[in-house]
Amino acid sequence: MRNDIGAALRAQRIETPSWAYGNSGTRFKVFAQEGVPRDPYEKIADAAQVHAFTGIAPTVALHIPWDRVDDYGDLARHAAGLGVGIGAINSNVFQDDDYKLGSVTNPDPAVRRKALGHLLECVDIMDATGSDTLKLWFSDGTNYPGQDDIRARQDRLAEALAAVYDRLGEGQRFLLEYKLFEPAFYLTDVPDWGTAYAHCVKLGSKAQVVVDTGHHAPGTNIEFIVAFLLREGRLGGFDFNSRFYADDDLMVGAADPFQLFRIMYEVVRGGGLRPEIAFMLDQCHNIEPKIPGQIRSVMNVQEATAKALLVDGEALAAAQAAGDVLGANAVLMDAYNTDVRPLLAALREEMGLDPDPMRAYARSGYFEKIRAERVGGTQAGWGA
Ligand code: RM4
Ligand code: MN
């Protein structure tokens, strides 16, 4: 393995989401699983397992209020004691009756104030946990033409974003997430990267765009968006997951590993494999076991990254300059078609890890332990 490739893979960091460890489902049914965490402390313990077996998942994202605790400093110390840190703080202004007509874009100023209050509280939690990233996703939108004024809603959104931006401290930033549709069906106030980008550019460099891979129309060229945002210095990070139909939140790389490779190639090409770009998972494991689901996902991102790093940049540039369409395409495909699993197994051994994280976790007895211990209490779930 080339030294630079090994070093890049060793330095890679992938963040797992606290909500992936709790019960989840669709709007039809949430399936309970054995051993599921009952509080944020247990979710972090599970995230620490993913890091222990992969070696590249040292932070866990929180979702407020799902991960509300009395003492966030204590939660951060608990995480540190388990060898992980607190990652992005995810705000939630979509699960309250008041937000039926929107949160920060709501026509009612009192609701807008309440939503902004929550966002500012999330910055307080960043201060208390040492997190440097706030993730903003708004479910805001309308279901019917004429329901509200599109321009006024953009004004309200801009006002709220500016207030959050002003509250950010030294070394803190926010990531603005976009999503094509759902839960609003006619209009979404931040539907695409262009809208998110325009709001961020107005505010300054601490406002960046986050690309959730599940939040696009079918067929969207996500790697173009990645290349563009990186070039503009506005790519803050990813929420990785897979989609077949809508915002499916399946394991990253499960639906379209080639797309994940193309995205990671643009990341490598654009110099994006660095700590300032957050590589986060945003997934739910509705029917598969959760910790192995996360381990598999981390490995999927790692495999796509290794393949992207294997692209022969010089040969590609030469073929492109010569107008050699087939040659250029072949350079990319050669890298994609390389089996990088032996290379990654060797890398893990060098890092003192088991070469097979899935089997090592299964053998560890952790699942049997949490299944026996975590009885009683209320299982954490999506929205709980
Ligand atoms: C949203 C969005 C956010 C995530 C929530 C759970 O669709 O993707 O990033 O925090 O879901
Ligand atoms: Mn997301």
Image (tube, rainbow, N blue to C red):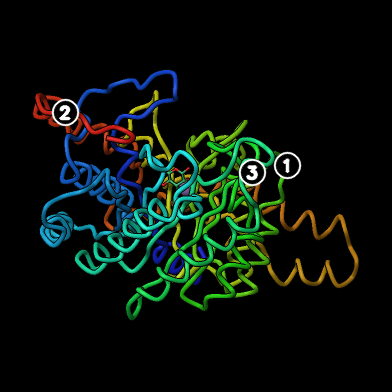
User: How far is mark 1 from mark 3, CA to CA?
Assistant: 20 Å
Residue 298: percent from the left, percent from the top? 41, 47
State the quadrant of the C terminus: top left
User: How far is mark 2 from mark 3, CA to CA?
Assistant: 36 Å
Give the crowd class for mark 2: few <14, some 14-19, many >=20 residues within 10 Å: few
Mark 1 or 3: in front is 3
Q: Is mark 3 within 8 Å of ligand 1?
A: no
The answer to whether residue 120 shows anywhere in this view is yes
Up-down relation of residue 66 to residue 31 (above or below): below
Secondary structure of the residue carrying tag 1 is loop
Mark 2 or 3: in front is 3
Q: Which residue occupies the foreground of this view, 177 or 40? A: 177
Furthest residue to the right? 323
User: Quick one: label 1 or label 2, which is nearer the N terminus?
Assistant: 1
- Residue 112, quarter of picture: bottom left
Q: Is mark 1 within 8 Å of ligand 2?
A: no
Disc 2 designates what residue? 378
Residue 86: percent from the left, percent from the top? 26, 59
Report the residue at 86% width, 55% height from top.
Answer: 326
Disc 1 designates what residue? 219
